[in-house]
Image: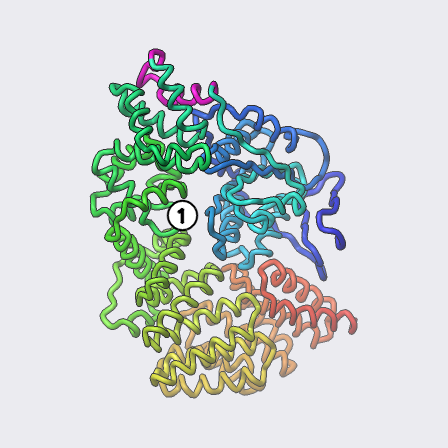
Amino acid sequence: MTGDVGGDNRFDGEAENVVQARDIHGDVHFHAPESPNPPPKQVPLPSRFFTNNERQLAEIGEFLRPGADSGQRPPGVVVVQGLPGSGKSETAYQWAHDHRDHYPDGAFYARLAAGTDEPGLVSEALHQFLVAVGYKTAELPAGLDARSNLFRSWSSSKKVVVVIDDAITAAQVVPLLPGEGNSAVLVTEARSLSALRVRAGAEFVPLDPLTDDAARLLVSRIVGGAKDLSGEADQVDRLIELCEGQTIALCVAAAEIASSPARPVARLVRELSKEGQLLGRLSRDADLSVKAVFNTAVARLDAEARQLYAAFGQHPGAGEVSLAALAAAVEHDEDDVREVLDRLTSAHLIREVAEDRYFAYSLVREHARELGGSAVRERFTEFYVRRALAAGHAVRPNRGWLEALWPGFEPEPVDVGEAREWLAAERANLRAVAKRLHETGSEQLCQLAVALWPFQEQGKHIDDMDVINGHAADVAGHRGLTFAAGLALIQRGFAFQARGESDKAAELFAEGEEKARAISRDDLAATAVESLGISLRNQGDRHGARTALERNLEMAERLADPRRLALARMHLGSVAEAQRGEHLLDQALAEFAAEPYNAAKTRMWRGRRRTEQERYDDAKADLGAALEYMTAHAHHFDRAQVLVGLGDNACAAGDSEAAQEHYLEAATICRTRGFAELGEQVRVRLDQSSKDS
């Protein structure tokens, strides 16, 4: 479809997989997960104290029409509006829970940090959606658009519900929308999302403060059997008046009553009233009532609980925090900290979102931050940096740059599987730590960038790679750490290369080489030159790549590192003239006997050189072996490169039908995975082969 955005796309009848995307060129192949998971159930359960908002729940139902047999249609989108703490999230959870039977194909949940629009936040949410339905991380594309297209394609003709919490822009929401079918989307608004009315046909449901009757019911439900409130109705009414019907304020106040049942409600009312200036402004700024209630709630905590509450205010970023991180920050045993966390959870100040992982809303964090704790702030940073260095080293232990940059570096031993899991769980927090280290100009940011790069490169966490290495290069430059700055520039270049921005990648590789030569680091200079050569090769500049990779081979020979020399031969062999290229590749292949991935890459390049020599059968054998390995191990970029080689071989041998088949498969991979540069090369080949056939 072209033309007006938001047109009526419909698919009549029955369909399995449907791709929805704009401006598609060539054929599209959609692949479902090899091992589909059971339907995800990601939406949090609503609170058992959920009260009122029945009218809003009914309005949501009218807009979303659950169970309506209306054929294929765009997802219904409802935005829930209200002040912080008004119960927007609980309303969305309650509606999704009440209507879960109408959405048998899955319930998806994304929490977007209010007040921030960090790169990769939406892309990570899509990653979680796709992994939940059965895709493996290695199968997922790196780009946001490609992930969004994949999720829409998977969800087309299905019935799913998606809850998106704390959205601040329409641009965050649109990529998370499912495909056409009978699906529903609920969005809680942290900032105005009026653009969604145009972009997604959204309806808006505002939440009003609780009525007096609803507020009384909420308080009585939370207090439960802890205290009989029948004799203190007037004081409960006064409490409701002070809170002006704001849900979060009422919840915290009721929790205070339940935690101290021997104290009269009048005492709490008097204490809240002492906050005269804050509570006097309650009618003008409801947020201040929340602060007053928080102050009262925290004053009732024991010393250990107050200390831990304050720690939430010093935690970096808006993500979840683990028990281990909190224990390190307050310097207490994990078991003891867990007991205190239970008290904070019971006070409704924090939520346990997974086993030993906790979340505090922004208002809680801001309030807790006022309690101070710079030492806790530093201990959080030290915890994340220390763990990240150990985990990153475990992912690629023989890389060598951490040891070269910081002699004496000795990481804690970590199981590689556990390391990957930890790095994946803490990505948002590590981004926040990197931002904090950038603000302070700490050298630790340079260490963090080096340690995280292998995980980022393997997982194609391109936005993380770009931002963290950009900050690291800036800090290293200001501190005169030329070695670290050069490496950060080179590492950042791979993010641009993955996005298809090869010119920018080449610029960064060149800057990295310049810094390496300024300090006579031949190993770093060789890495920069090699990276530049690879980038030029990916652009199709074979002459430029050959020049750079000839230099790289000369440098590798001087450095006399056997593995570096084997890699240099392989890369130069990929662009050298056919006969010399094959000789270099033969040498590299012999040296990669213990490295099957690099052996497969070498066979791929040797197959392409043999095609140039018109040795089509030998070339096909090499390329077929390489394709088998790359397919089995989900190396998607390499697989696409091998398919291009097979297409070139078939085309040169006169088999245009086989060539088209290989090119089309490569084009599908490039389009799905966001390999822009290679995708353009495939498109040119497809156009030419179509003319020739």
Tell me how many marks there are: 1
Q: Is residue 566 visible?
A: no
Asked where in the image residue 648 lies, by quadrant, the reply is bottom right
Residue nearest the observer in this picture, 444 or 270: 270
Asked where in the image residue 544 lies, by quadrant, the reply is bottom right
Q: Which residue is mark 1?
A: 319
Residue nearest the observer in this picture, 564 or 248: 248
The answer to whether 264 is drawn above or below residue 400 in the figure is above
The answer to whether 644 is drawn above or below residue 184 in the figure is below
Residue nearest the observer in this picture, 77 or 82: 82
| Residue 94 belongs to magenta span | no
Give residue 250's position: percent from left, percent from top: 40, 27
| Residue 218 belongs to magenta span | yes
Label 1 neighbour load within 10 Å: few <14, some 14-19, many 20+:
many
Residue stretch rendered in magenta on the structure: 213-231
Give residue 45's position: percent from left, percent from top: 46, 31
The answer to whether 187 is drawn above or below residue 120 in the figure is above
Report the quarter where the C terminus lies. Answer: bottom right
Give residue 256's position: percent from left, percent from top: 31, 27
As shown in the figure, which amino acid type bears the numbered disc 1?
Gly
Q: Is residue 443 visible?
A: yes
Give residue 161's position: percent from left, percent from top: 58, 37
Which residue is rendered at x = 45% and y = 69% of the image?
A: 492
- Chosen colour scheme: rainbow
Q: Helix, strand, or loop for circle 1?
A: loop
Asked where in the image residue 334 lies, by quadrant, the reply is top left
Report the magenta stretch's main SS: helix
In the rendered image, the residue lying farthest to the top is 231
Which residue is rendered at x = 71% and y = 58% of the image?
A: 23
